[in-house]
Amino acid sequence: MLSGLTIDQLPGAERKKKPKAPASPDTVEDFCLSFPKPPVDPAKIRRISSARARLFRVASQGALLPARTLLPTQPTRVESEETVTTRDSVVKINGIYLTESKAIGHLKRHPLQLTYDGDFSKITEQEMFKGATSVPFHLRSGGDQGKRRPRASSSSRSPDQSRLDIRAGSKADLQEKNTEIEVDEVFWNTRIVPILHDLEKEENIEMVCATCTQLHHALEEGNMLGNKFKRRSVLLKTLYKLVDVGSDLLSLKLAKIILALKVSGKNLLNVCKLIFKISRSEKNDSLIRNDSILESLLEVLRSEDLQANTEAFLYCMGTIKFISGNPEFLHEMMGKGAVEILMSLIKQVNENTKKSGTCLPNSGHLLVQMTATLRNLVDSPLARSKLLSINALPQLCTVMEQHIGDKDVCTNIARIFSKLTSYHDCCVALASYSRCYALFLNLINKYQKKQDLVVRVVFILGNLTAKNNQAREQFSKEKGSIPTLLSLFHTFYKLDLHSGKRWGEGDERPEARRPAQAEDVLIKLTRVLANLAIHPGVGPAIAAHSHIVGLLLATLESKSIDDCEELVINTTATINNLSYYKVKNSIIQDRKLYIAELLLKLLVSNNMDGILEAVRVFGNLSQDHDICDFIVQKNVHKFMIALLDAKHQDICFSACGVLLNLTVDRDKRLILKEGGGIKKLVDCLRDFGPTDWQLASLVCKTLWNFSENITNAASCFGDEAANTLLALLSSFLDEELALNGSFDQDLKNYHKLHWETEFRPVAQQLLNRIKNHHTFLEPLPIPSF
């Protein structure tokens, strides 16, 4: 009798209907060590009660049940929903998580039973030829025909023609068939039987393993693999007995042969369970790799019927998932077509679900294993290429749509997309699938407080909107897109704030309340907002959204760059993008002085990325007269001049933009002479001009504003700066010299465009002004008396 299940449910596990053990039989027969002969036909199966099958166990994983299985008198269908989803200490069965010890105990209470596929042992040669229409099993279609040795009869005959020939009672055909049977008998008796005898009498495990390898090669040579030859049941009996030995290596050897013999039903399920148990230990990876078990498992997935063998597929996929985490299997999995096989199965599941209108039993568990395997494989460039070539991304989105209530499936696919969208071609492919945006919004709304899933979905959205303006527009047009992001922002801002207040510095915090988790979501979310703000149709709307801007400012106020660098930088970048828009009702413009105050602490930090983002915001805000006054009052202009010495191209560009805005006001132009501002601007022109004509144009515009009332170039800029400007501008305005950089053609065209449209017009005017107010006469020395 199978014992009941004892399970410990971990928090968060979904409740599923527990599998029930079959009822006790009315009668109990004595246990017999030898295998019973299988019934002759399905009708006999229904007439024979208490049929028994030999049990096998694996000693290295702990003993299974005693080799006694009591079955009910009447056939009882028991659908197991076991699923093991992890390789370490936690196992998921029926949506419930077990510790490793209890999972193994569960397997103990569900012994691995092996039965027979057909009554091969009772079919004699005379019976095979009774009647003109019977065909020998080893000639029937469905076996490994491609590997069979040449026969006297033609394998290209059509079934109809073959039946006509048999009905005609052709003596030649019968003679050919007899010859084939005789050849098989001779090969069986001379090559296979001696090996089977060796297996039965050999006691040394290593020798038994070697003999199994020899047997496999002999069966392959004799084309006796598959399920279409007469002696198959005798062979299986011998193999099943050896499973009791309990060696992992031997069990894998046996499993490989059994799978090659194309077992089905319970036998297929149990051999998949056996391999799965062995694969749970990483130390067995080398055994699995050396025996090429992966190929056998992939063949099961490729050739067997999914709906008829869902549970066997489950254990098969569990093994493949385990070994996919080992980089040493990656090349083999790619070479054996693992990605294509998995996606073909996923497509079948999608089609079956669509056809039935509901998720089929165990499909969720199977999808967890398949998507976890794909998650491990997508680190390979070849896997990514294959996924793109077979248009797999929409299929994965369909899985999420159909199984949106299964958090494990959705999390695995989110992890796949997180990896894929880090690569441009994959990102473009997913962004072009228009249904993905509504799907991701639905996931956020459904799992808003599930940090591990939400953070990945938001990360994907950040990747999609990073460099794709169409993606920004499509997402923003989805119903409820901005309100969903706002709700998520509010949820995790409060969670982070609550965690920080409730838990002291030395206190241990619950996992769900750790600020790092909330901050991680906020980091990804502010990145999405910053990307969306780039779109001219979206940015102004966000800038006028008081709640979003309020949360951004609250985040900037409450966080130090030393506490959470990435969050502060992303928040500042979002404010910078929003500050670009000078629109009515802009909250950024209304609160510009408060924002400027918040940015001061960033300017005095030691973080160059934080300083850069703060300077960029000042670059936009300093177009306002009040902000310019604030900059001078707080001596921020001195800091901008000092940054020109940073030798950092982006920082120099942004600082120069602030100084340019200050020089629009005539009263503030003289501040450029403080701290050697003129010389530093000229140095920036010299250092960065040939590689950044936009920066060069900013320098020229700033100097043009500064020199509006020039009377003498030397007195305005200083002798050295004036002479340097004359030389630099003359050189940079020579097209051949200016555009003679070692760039590729696209970059050359880019540089030429900015040189012609931005730099050359203002540089030419500045050069003419300096020439008109510059003298090349050197002063005479003071005469001596």
Image (cartoon, rainbow, N blue to C red):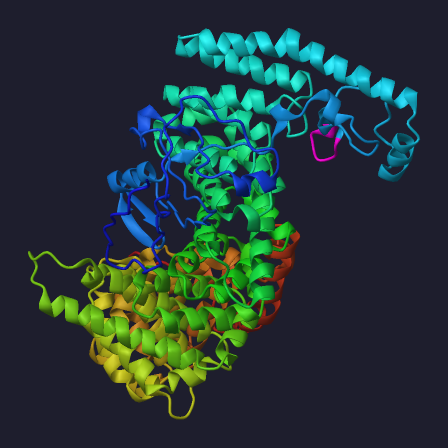
Q: Quadrant of residue 567?
A: bottom left
Say whether residue 569 is visible.
no
At a point 71% along the width and 29% down the height, the residue shown is 137
In this rendering, would 279 be left or right of 552?
right
Residue at horizontal 78 percent and vertical 32 percent from the top: 134
State the residue in front, 321 or 582: 321
Left or right for 67, reference 332: left
For residue 334, above or below residue 145 = below
Report the front residue among 499 and 577. Answer: 499
Does residue 117 appear in this view? Answer: yes
Count of picture labels: 0
Residue 192 rendering spot, x and y as whole percentages: 61, 12
Task: Locate the C terminus by quadrant.
Answer: bottom left
Tell me if residue 144 is in the magenta stretch. yes
Counting from the top left corner in percent of width and height, residue 704 is at 45, 75
| Residue positioned most to the bottom | 584
Location of residue 341 by image quarter: top right
Q: Position of residue 194 (x, y in %)?
A: 57, 7
Prevalent SS, magenta region: loop
Q: Which segment is the magenta one?
A: 140-146
Q: Is 400 placed above or below 385 here?
A: below
Question: Does 529 lie within the magenta span?
Answer: no
Q: Position of residue 747 (x, y in %)?
A: 60, 56
Query: Which residue corresponds to the image point at 48% horizontal and 82% vertical from the top-left?
Result: 479
In what quadrant of the picture does the N terminus appear? top left
Q: Nearer the viewer, residue 270 or 758?
A: 270
149 or 176: nearer the viewer: 176
The vertical placement of 702 against 223, above or below, is below
Q: Is residue 630 left or right of residue 388?
A: left
